[in-house]
Amino acid sequence: MIVSPKIRGFICTTAHPEGCAKHVEEQIAVVKEKGTIEGGPKKVLVIGSSTGYGLSSRIAAAFGSNAATVGVFFERPGSEGKTATAGWYNTVAFEKEAKEAGLYARSFNGDAFSDEVKHEVIQAIHEDLGQVDLVIYSLASPRRTHPKTGEVLKSVLKPIGENYTNKTLNTTTGAVDEVSIEPAEGDDVDQTVAVMGGEDWEMWMDALMKAGVLAEGVQTVAYSYIGPEMTWPIYKNGTIGAAKEDVEKVQRSLDSKLAPISGKAWVSVNKALVTQASSAIPVVPLYISLLYKAMKDEGNHEDTIEQMDRLFRERLYNGKPDPDEAGRIRVDDWEMSDKIQEIVAKRWDEVDSDNLRDIADFEGYQNGFLRLFGFGLDGVDYEAETDTAVGVPSLS
């Protein structure tokens, strides 16, 4: 089958096996080039391991610290004539590279919110690794079936209190338009917190602790984002922001629970990047396009792998986490520098459909989006037939 990108809204409905493999290889090369992460993790569980920050976390742990990794995700395998999701192909490639490097890698495909998946993963850790010394929580989902009540909960991206109107970017046409979003109503906030908040993170850690598979001194990290004021109504002060506040509340709870084994819970605030999750948020793609231009000009642009490598290498495992006043690790520090934010804010006021390509990196945004699905990478023959039905080795 010859695979080409088919884009619908903020989703690409196809993915390229060799392209995804190339993307994984490139991320591994970034980590290897920087050498070993001294004192890094050795047995790692990544919940939400197949794309974005979760995938890069797994790569940084494995190839920066020679860690054994367990990954959990919910992806669709391919079949004859139909591609798998990008996360499936990413995991195929990751496991292949891990095996060649002599590294343990085992993956679980299923509903990470469920008790059943938690049980399966804990059994595997118990049997294969004994304990884990790092747990990464990087789930992003539009819905969750609550494991105790069976209720199907849905998250929404809405402001709280009043309508929000601002510039946004049509990522297909490059047109800068205006978007108006109605505020949350009913139980929108509660449902979003139930899906994207910290409850499931805490359930995972409680289950892992009860089973005795957390090592002395274990660290756990959940990922978050804050961003600039221009995005706050739809993000920080919106429904998703309420969920992130809940994650921070859970972090404090987990700190107390982990204290008896000298463990530590962190929230890491990461940089705005093109991910499958961020592409769905109005206003944010335009901000990212402006941000990419400013940071590339400054020479300090990072993608997910550089962010996670820096998080591990310079914050979690060098004794200098340098938390902010709220106790969060900030690897969005380069993004949020006064210099970068002043440039972005000025260009935000100026940007329109005519000057977008001059003052923003729209091409970089589009390329970044396509790369998520394995397209647009050098060294891949996109005109060649490819096997879309490849399997994840540890799942076969």
Image (cartoon, helix red, strand yellow):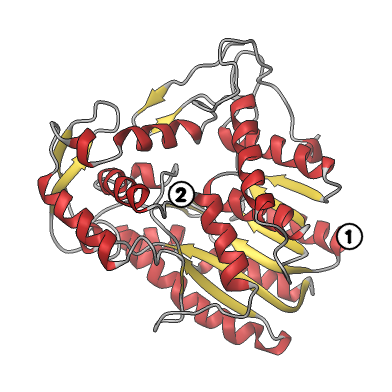
Q: What quarter of the picture does the C terminus occupy? A: top right
Q: In which quarter of the image is residue 367?
A: top left
Mark 1: amino acid: Glu
Q: Are the residues at dot 1 and dot 2 in contact (C-beta closer than 8 Å)?
A: no
Asked if residue 388 can be seen in this view, the reply is yes
Q: In which quarter of the image is residue 114?
A: bottom right
Question: Which residue in the rendered view is the most extreme toward the bottom?
Answer: 260
Query: Residue 154 or 383: which is nearer the viewer?
Result: 383
Q: In which quarter of the image is residue 270?
A: bottom left
Q: Is residue 349 left or right of residue 301?
A: left
Q: Which residue sits at x=29%, y=33%? A: 171
Q: In this view, does 229 lie to the left or right of 335?
A: left
Which label's residue is closer to the chain start, 1 or 2? 1
Q: Residues within 10 Å of mark 2 (few under 14, many from 20)?
A: some
Query: Residue 283 or 197: which is nearer the viewer?
Result: 283
Mark 2 lies on a secondary structure that is strand
Q: Which residue sits at x=71%, y=47%? A: 108
Query: Residue 4 or 248: which is nearer the viewer?
Result: 4
Vertical position of residue 121 compared to residue 167: above or below: below
Query: Residue 207 or 273: which is nearer the viewer?
Result: 273
User: x and y percent of residue 349 in the render?
Assistant: 11, 50
User: x and y percent of residue 259 in the render?
Assistant: 65, 88
Reading the image, the residue beneath label 2 is: 143
